[in-house]
Image (tube, coloured by chain):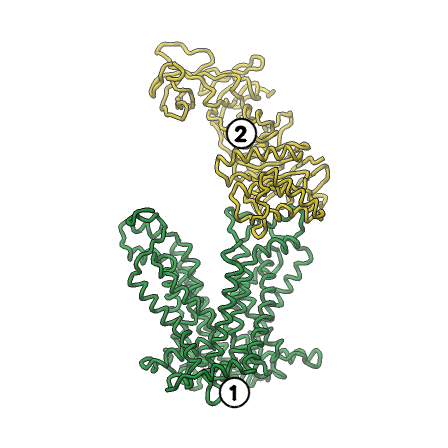
């Protein structure tokens, strides 16, 4: 059993607070990714799990056993935690061969020579590096070094595997193939993996669950699909590539759908996803590719659940066109296939258009930047922390209760 | 194959015809650096002293090589150098690791201490420890007598020699190892920890081997320099009957009648040969391997907490500071204030007055100052010229001056002096330079050129070519781009090299001891003479004044550097 549990992890470096109460739990055999921009604390969290850094407060358990707790004065050093780690710079020892590097964890555990050799050659063969066993590691390419680093992390069959942005030094094509190898290796080993990255594509394709972090807090935890389709906070939506984040007011609720008026009275726009208050300020999040756009003839009535506006620019965006539409002062980005492909009418800059939101793909997000917006959807607020993030224009305070 | 007129790709080094500047530099390098070494070979086979008429003969050569005394001295040199370098490297590695990787108290003091110890001339340590250990007047003797009633410690012995050498060598080796230790990727140790190894095992099996090439380089350098040391063995070894090659070389010239120049030259060649063999062995063993990589991210790596073991580190640091700085400085200052050395009453500044008023003292200080400033400037300028050429020129000859300077590492102080004597006295026109301050100046320039080159080579290498290229594109001529941009950027390291070589020159004994004459001494020579005459207190006074000047110079240097930095933003 190699579960990983973090409770209330805090860490400060001098005056800066790097981790503000992190809670996390990874089930046995799960692949969990910590996703976020630079400086969000994801690497610090990983290093605390590894034991390479000590948190100022909070508790870390691996396999149910407390490995670090400042309050109880427990700290298990990294060499006693039964983990494997893949570093961003690979950290292969330059004076040793591939074989010596990979065999090192077994040597330390005093495995006998025959078993050691079997295990090492086995894991190297799985990585396709068996022929390189006697090479000095300084002669390997980046991708090869990464594979050796992976082999070394896995050879002693640790219960937990930690990955610190292992693919960021590789080119895009190599990254894609290595991603698959990492996931395959994880599946074969049965270990619990904690993976750190700032690349959302990596996170989405690799993980069972994703933890989005920002400035030392957890913004949202969920499956890749949940995170991608239903971001819980403005930050997560923005980070995951939602081009449109429109402030609005709740106008009506009908079953699972909510109508929201945006851009100072336009719409309403209907949204089925996300959580929102019964009334008051809210954010509508929609991807540019999920919106529908069409010319609006003068005098024509707006279709239902659409907003009208004027196209300010239209650029070719590889496989389609990207329109910037001005909806009563609010910019909206729409991406659509080229008219030549769709057979529809051409749209140019300066034209009046209507834009329709698909309720099944439009997300409601609580209009506050604080972390107390219940990101995990468990009904409990996450760690509270005032954020200095971007404030949207203040909406008048509503006195009705929240759901 | 591409057409002959194809333009070489950006950054490619085509073999251009060497320009006039490069040819001049090569000529200077050959004359200044290579010719004295060649003349050592010439001198080994002559019968007469340099400058006198003589004939060819192998008698001096074979006589020296078959002499039991010479081989005994050679063995002593190996033994002394070897034991010194083993101890000092261990200590230096420990200090570097303590400073870079741990939270030991007092570790912030190590680098300033090492810089100070490095700046102080080796003669200082030798002289002060000679006084400290003097029986019965030295400080150590007095203290040990008071406590134990007897002193087992005689500084004029193998132990004393090794201790004095180790003190100075450790500081230099520490400073050289600091860079590689800092540059080592911390992830290497972390990977080892995560694999299950403890800190000690990680250090021994991972970090030390990764640093191996750097450590080995420092060891060999230390051994090479140790073989050529003169001052320690001269002051502490000879009275105890311990002879090493450099002291034998000196003895063959100054201590026997008639002087055996051929024998001295032969021994010098022996020394040079040994060093060259060592250096060749090193480059064979290591090839181009350098395992220290500079990390892209400056990882915030918390230093190791050693628990109770950190106090051992503090004790070592404090002990080193005590033995290398506090005791010697204390002994010097005290000794200079005593009426006679060993009499700890009636302290006054009388000795300072005596030294300053003595005939020849004023001239000694003047000469030392002049030599330090001028030799430092010239050596630093040469170093910049040679490094620039080696790194920027497109001709195949560009490495020649650099190699010539490199050769000089193999030619320690006294052998260089001998080589210069042969080189300049054998040429009729240059003979008049002998026994003037100019030959001392020249020898010091040549002798400190390797240090100067090494000091500026790194910073020059870090200046991107693009900075000059941008100037060229903006319309500046080649000369203007070089002078205006490149030299301005090199200026801070030039200043550092200037002061470094100035300081080393001012404290050097090996060169003036053969090349200076009584009416153009330098302060180290003055101090040595006073010591030999038994006027220890005055020797201390003379040296204290020199150190005061060096300290003032260091303060000025630091101020200048800070001002330069502030101006360039």
> What's the distance in space between the residues labelled 2 and 1, CA to CA?
84 Å
Near-viewer residue (B335 or B55): B55
Mark 1, Cα crowd under 10 Å, few <14 / some 14-19 / many 20+, is few
Can residue B259 be seen in this snapshot? yes
Chain seen in yellow: A
**Going by the image, does B561 lie left or right of A199?**
left
Decide: marks 2, 1 in contact (CB < 8 A)?
no
**Going by the image, does B496 lie left or right of B322?**
left
**For the point 52% across and 81% down, which residue is it?**
B248
Chain ID of residue with mark 1:
B
Near-viewer residue (A30 or A234): A30
Near-viewer residue (B531 or B67): B67
Residue B502 position by quadrant: bottom left
Residue B227 picture location, percent across and down: 53, 73
Picture colour for chain B:
green
Residue B28 picture location, percent across and down: 34, 69
Disc 1 designates what residue? Answer: B533
Q: Does B84 sit above or below residue A182?
A: below
Disc 2 designates what residue? Answer: A236
């Amino acid at each position: 059993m190699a579960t990983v549990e973090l409770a209330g992890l805090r860490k400060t470096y001098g005056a800066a607070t790097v981790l503000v109460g992190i809670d996390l739990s990874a089930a046995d055999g799960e692949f969990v990714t910590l996703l976020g921009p630079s400086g969000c604390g994801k690497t610090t969290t990983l290093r605390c799990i590894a034991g390479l850094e000590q948190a100022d407060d909070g508790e870390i358990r691996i396999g149910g056993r407390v490995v670090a707790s400042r309050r109880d004065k427990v700290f298990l050093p990294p060499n006693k935690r039964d983990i494997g780690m893949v570093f961003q710079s690979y950290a292969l020892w330059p004076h040793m061969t591939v074989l010596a590097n990979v065999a090192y964890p077994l040597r330390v555990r005093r495995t006998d020579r025959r078993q050691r050799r079997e295990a090492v050659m086995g894991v190297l063969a799985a990585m396709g590096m068996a022929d390189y066993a006697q090479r000095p590691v300084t002669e390997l390419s980046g991708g090869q070094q990464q594979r050796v680093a992976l082999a070394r992390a896995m050879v002693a069959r640790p219960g937990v595997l930690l990955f610190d942005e292992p693919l960021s030094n590789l080119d895009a094509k190599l990254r894609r193939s290595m991603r698959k190898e990492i996931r395959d290796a994880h599946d074969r080993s049965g270990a619990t993996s904690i993976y750190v990255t700032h690349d959302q594509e990596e996170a989405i394709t690799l993980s069972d669950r994703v933890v989005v972090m920002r400035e030392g807090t957890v913004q949202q935890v969920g499956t890749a699909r949940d995170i991608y389709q239903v971001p819980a906070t403005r930050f997560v939506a923005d980070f995951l590539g939602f081009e449109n984040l429109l402030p609005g007011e709740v106008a009506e609720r009908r079953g699972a759908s909510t109508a929201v008026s945006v851009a100072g009275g336009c719409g309403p726009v209907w949204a089925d996803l996300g959580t929102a208050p019964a009334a008051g300020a809210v954010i509508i999040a929609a991807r540019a590719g999920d919106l529908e756009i069409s010319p609006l003839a003068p005098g024509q009535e707006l279709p239902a659940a659409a907003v009208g506006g004027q196209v300010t620019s239209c650029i070719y965006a590889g496989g389609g066109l990207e329109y910037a539409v001005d909806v009563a002062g609010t910019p909206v980005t729409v991406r659509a296939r080229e008219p030549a492909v769709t057979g529809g009418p051409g749209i140019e800059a300066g034209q009046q258009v209507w834009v329709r939101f698909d309720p099944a793909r439009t997300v409601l997000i609580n209009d506050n930047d604080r972390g107390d917006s219940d990101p995990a959807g468990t009904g409990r607020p996450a760690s509270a922390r005032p954020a200095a993030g971007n404030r949207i224009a203040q909406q008048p305070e509503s006195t009705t209760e929240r759901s | 194959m591409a057409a002959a007129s194809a333009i070489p790709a950006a950054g490619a080094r085509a073999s251009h015809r060497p320009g006039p500047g490069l040819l001049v530099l090569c000529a200077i390098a050959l004359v200044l650096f290579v010719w004295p070494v060649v003349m050592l070979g010439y001198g080994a086979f002559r019968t007469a002293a340099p400058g006198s008429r003589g004939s060819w003969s192998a008698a001096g050569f074979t006589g020296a090589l078959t002499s039991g005394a010479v081989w005994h001295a050679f063995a002593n040199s190996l033994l002394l150098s070897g034991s010194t370098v083993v101890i000092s490297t261990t200590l230096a590695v420990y200090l570097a690791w303590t400073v870079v990787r741990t939270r030991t108290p007092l570790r912030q003091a190590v680098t300033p201490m090492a810089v100070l110890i490095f700046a102080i001339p080796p003669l200082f340590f030798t002289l002060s420890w000679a006084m400290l250990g003097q029986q019965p007047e030295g400080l150590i003797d007095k203290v040990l007598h008071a406590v134990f009633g007897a002193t087992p410690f005689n500084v004029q012995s193998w132990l004393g020699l090794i201790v004095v050498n180790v003190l100075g060598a450790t500081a230099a080796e520490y400073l050289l190892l600091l860079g590689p230790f800092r540059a080592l990727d911390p992830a290497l140790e972390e990977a080892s920890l995560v694999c299950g190894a403890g800190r000690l095992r990680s250090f021994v099996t991972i970090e030390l081997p990764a640093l191996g090439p750097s450590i080995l380089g420092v060891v060999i350098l230390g051994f090479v320099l140790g073989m050529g040391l003169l001052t320690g063995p001269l002051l502490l070894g000879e009275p105890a009957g311990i002879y090493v090659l450099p002291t034998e070389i000196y003895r063959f010239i100054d201590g026997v009648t008639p002087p055996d120049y051929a024998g001295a030259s032969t021994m010098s060649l022996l020394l040079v040969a040994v060093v060259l063999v060592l250096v060749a062995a090193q480059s064979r063993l290591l090839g181009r391997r350098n395992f220290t990589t500079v990390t892209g991210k400056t990882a915030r790596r918390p230093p190791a907490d050693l628990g109770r073991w950190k106090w051992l580190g503090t004790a070592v640091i404090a002990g080193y500071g005590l033995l290398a700085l506090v005791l010697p400085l204390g002994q010097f200052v005290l000794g200079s204030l005593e009426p006679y050395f060993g009499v700890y009453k009636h302290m006054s500044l009388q000795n300072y007055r005596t030294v300053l008023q003595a005939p020849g003292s004023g001239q000694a200080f003047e000469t030392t100052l002049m030599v330090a400033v001028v030799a430092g400037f010239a050596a630093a300028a040469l170093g910049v010229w040679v490094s620039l050429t080696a790194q920027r020129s497109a001709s195949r000859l560009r490495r020649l001056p650099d190699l010539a300077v490199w050769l000089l590492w193999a030619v320690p102080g006294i052998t260089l002096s001998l080589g210069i004597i042969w080189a300049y006295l054998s040429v009729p026109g240059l003979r008049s330079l002998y026994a003037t301050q100019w030959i001392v100046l020249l020898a010091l320039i040549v002798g400190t050129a390797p240090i100067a080159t090494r000091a500026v080579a790194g910073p020059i290498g870090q200046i991107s070519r693009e900075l000059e290229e941008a100037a060229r594109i903006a319309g500046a001529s080649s000369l203007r781009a070089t002078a205006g941009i490149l030299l301005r950027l090199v200026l801070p390291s030039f200043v550092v090299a200037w002061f470094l070589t100035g300081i080393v020159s001012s404290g050097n004994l090996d060169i003036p001891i053969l090349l200076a004459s009584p009416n153009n001494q330098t302060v180290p020579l003055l101090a040595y003479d006073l010591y030999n005459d038994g006027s220890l207190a005055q020797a201390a006074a003379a040296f204290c004044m020199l150190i005061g000047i060096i300290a003032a110079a260091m303060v000025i240097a630091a101020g200048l550097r800070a001002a330069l930095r502030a101006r360039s933003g």
